[in-house]
Image (spheres, rainbow, N blue to C red):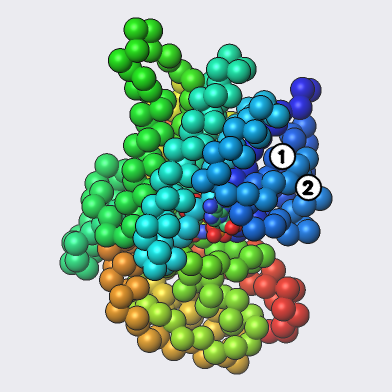
Amino acid sequence: MSTKTILVTGANGEIGHGLIEYLSEYGGINIVAMDIVSIDESVKARCHRLVTGDVLDTYLLETLSTEHNFDTIYHLAALLSTRAERQPTLAHRVNVDGTLNLLEIAITQSHLQGQKIKFIYPSSIAVYGLPDLETKRKAGKVKEDQWLSPRTMYGINKLYDEQLGRYYTNYYRQLDAEPPKGQIDFRGIRFPGLISAVTLPTGGTSDFAPEMLHMAAKNMDYKCFVREDTRIPFMAMPDAVTALLRLQAAPYEKITQAVYNVGVFSPSALEMSQILKKAFPNNSIKFLSDYRRQAIIDSWPADVDDTAARCDWDWKPEYTLERAFSEYLIPAVQKRYSVKS
Ligand SMILES: NC(=O)c1ccc[n+]([C@@H]2O[C@H](COP(=O)([O-])OP(=O)(O)OC[C@H]3O[C@@H](n4cnc5c(N)ncnc54)[C@H](O)[C@@H]3O)[C@@H](O)[C@H]2O)c1
């Protein structure tokens, strides 16, 4: 088996940890891991090369591109929704210009190698923007082409990046005498909120769910920043990694759209707190809604329609709500914080 080389940006983040752990165990892959912060010890040992650098540094990216033949690029680096709202211009630079830089590297790689380069991109349910709670309730499971009026800088960046991916795949340099075709194979997933037992999130607006879990496991009280009836979709981290790998591995002719919804469970914040209360009865979870962050969450759908992912690349989550908490999240955080229930 020939060894493939892949580039993972944002490798030190939550998804990066999970993805690199899986890819390194799978074997036959050289992982070039890049992040603006230095990469954790647990990830380091699994990688072929570590690069500390900024996705805005085009010189660094071009140098990397001369040194490696990348088969696939997993472009995970981003500023997440809450952080992006606090630093909107920086978010635009990192989330949009950074993605453009990586797409250009994919084009260069395609020229050098004479083959399509896969570009795997984690988008988000933040691309959706429902105007009010009544509409959100009536909308139910939202399809990929509905309610695309995001109210956050992050959501706008993600939606635009999806369009860039579509452009680079289908229309890149379309006015050239001989437009180059089929250089990039862009595949995106609109992730819901992700919950990991291993890493803690920073800077996202769906962070209330993982924060609730980790605080409960640490036996600490938690003030949840959304209302009890708040409902958005979530997924356990192992399923997010599986989704990226399945989408990456799907045959080209099966891919019918640039970006796919994936959904799993959609409990209210209260329902989630009740599950945790059973496992960790000694701590309290209070609901003190922060109206600004609440407004963002209320604009995201209560659930998503992921029929296309199920049909095109056999998307099927392993961790239902019940399994995610009882078999993965709760046992793992109990072990991590050594808490006895
Ligand atoms: N975690 C979620 O709930 C969620 C949901 C939907 C989509 N996503 C998307 O998945 C991707 C990964 O998310 P995550 O949860 O691992 O986030 P994360 O914040 O844990 O990781 C992002 C990583 O990107 C790095 N980074 C930031 N700016 C950079 C720059 N200029 N150059 C290089 N690296 C930089 C950060 O240091 C961090 O390690 C992101 O694109 C995010 O938008 C995440």
Of labels 2 and 1, earlier in sequence is 1
For mark 1, give the secondary structure: strand
- Which quadrant would the N terminus be assigned to in this image? top right
Q: Amino acid at mark 1?
A: Ile
Q: Looking at the figure, which quarter contains the C terminus? A: bottom right
Q: Position of residue 297 (x, y in %)?
A: 34, 67
The yes-or-no answer for disc 1 within 8 Å of ligand 1 is no
30 to the left or right of 276: right
State the SS at label 2: loop
Give the side of residue 90 with respect to residue 19, left or right: left
Q: Amino acid at mark 2?
A: Arg
Does residue 180 sit above or below 32 in this rendering?
above
Which quadrant of the structure image shows residue 288? Answer: bottom left
Q: CA distance from mark 2 to mark 1?
A: 8 Å
| Label drawn at residue 46 | 2
Q: Position of residue 237 (x, y in %)?
A: 58, 57
Q: Is residue 252 above or below residue 295?
A: above
Q: Left or right? Give the position of 212 relative to 166.
A: right
Q: Which residue is mark 1?
A: 31
Q: Nearer the viewer, residue 168 or 94?
A: 94
Q: Is residue 315 visible?
A: no
**Mark 2 touches mark 1? (CB < 8 Å):** yes
